[in-house]
Image (spheres, rainbow, N blue to C red):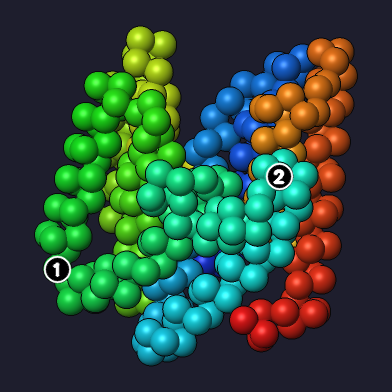
Amino acid sequence: MNTSRLFQLQDISTYRSELMGWAIVWIMMLHFTFTQIKPLGFIAQYGFAGVEIFMMVSGLGLYFSLDKDGRLSHFYKKRLLRIFPTYYLLGIFGSLLLYHDTLWEYLFRYSTIGFWTGGIYAEWYIPSIVALYLVAPFIKQLIDRRWYWITGLMCLLLLVASYIVVAGEYVGKGEAHFFLLYRVPTFVLGMMCGYWIRHGITSRYYWLLLIAGLPFFAMLYPHHHEVYNYKYFSLLFLLPLTVVIFTGMSKVIHWINPMMAEIGKASLEVYIIQGMFFHALLTGLITIPAPWHDAATAGFMVLSTALGIFAHWAIEKSGISKFF
């Protein structure tokens, strides 16, 4: 089989928005979950792997951004203005309706400081991705200088540390930080893919990673009933395959690409909004009778997506980030 037709590294960049769209839909399927529709329920339970796609695609995008303009002040300004005005604006609804924050608590929660200091925070992903933004220029320097052994050793150490945490079930209160820890290698892989694309390197390294990951998945996943967090960790090794599948879907199902691209461009807003609904369901602020669960799941996904796309459009049109 000619794998170049199935997948090329450039596909990750070409279908970047679509990949983010598929990823956020998969994450929403996990959070809201289908219970009666079995095929969708089976797929939904692995939706946390959508975060790996986000991490990888983010790493790719940051590599190209830094390659285009290496000025750190411009890089950090652009990245932080994409995150924080939106995070604070949408966070007003979370603080008022879900957390009942004081003004100080609201500012503390959405500054992401609480996530790193053991204080209050809204969710784990945005504090984590902001931290990765901060170290991205350093990682790019390592990759560009071809210090692959340093980059690889760093990722290997993180994987070993993650495995110890998972195998020992040391997650508990630090679960949110663990969710970042074991995904750092996927972020670095995204930056590495950016390097490979930038320098016209073929997809062979990517295919080698895909093939190498399969035995690790096969070794870990069958034991996820014994060690629960193996479910999370084992899916990490399927990331290269997952990306191939979703880019393949984007190639084959052409008519859905415009919609998935729009969702992907608004994925930050969709993620924040669906997270509020998810929190309301977890805490019992919203309760759904069992017979209506799947209909409510579809409804929350559609509503979160529509509100996220609208919020993205409104924030872009307002130019609000220029005032920050």
Judging depth in this view, the residue of 160 and 19 nearest the camera is: 160
Tell me which residue sits at (67%, 35%) in the image: 279
- Please tell me whether residue 264 is drawn above or below residue 221 in the rendered image: below
Name the quadrant containing residue 284: top right
Q: Position of residue 78 (x, y in %)?
A: 53, 80
- Judging by the rendered image, the residue that carries numbered circle 2 is 100
Judging depth in this view, the residue of 157 and 152 nearest the camera is: 157
Q: Tell me the quadrant of the picture where the C terminus can be found.
A: bottom right
In this figure, what is the number of numbered marks?
2
Would residue 30 appear left or right of 217 to someone viewing this image? right
Q: Are marks 2 and 1 in contact (CB under 8 Å)?
A: no
- Please tell me whether residue 100 is drawn above or below residue 57 in the rendered image: above
Judging depth in this view, the residue of 288 and 139 nearest the camera is: 288
Circle 2 SS class: loop
Would residue 31 appear left or right of 143 to someone viewing this image? right
Dot 1 crowding, Cα within 10 Å, few <14, some 14–19, many 20+:
few
The amino acid pointed to by label 2 is His
Marks 2/1: CA distance?
48 Å
- Judging by the rendered image, the residue that carries numbered circle 1 is 147
Q: Position of residue 321 (x, y in %)?
A: 66, 79
Circle 1 SS class: loop
Would residue 30 appear left or right of 262 to someone viewing this image? left
The amino acid pointed to by label 1 is Trp
Q: Tell me the quadrant of the picture where the N terminus can be found.
A: top left
**Nearest to N terminus: mark 2 or mark 1:** 2
Tell me which residue sits at (19%, 60%) in the image: 151
Tell me which residue sits at (68%, 56%) in the image: 91
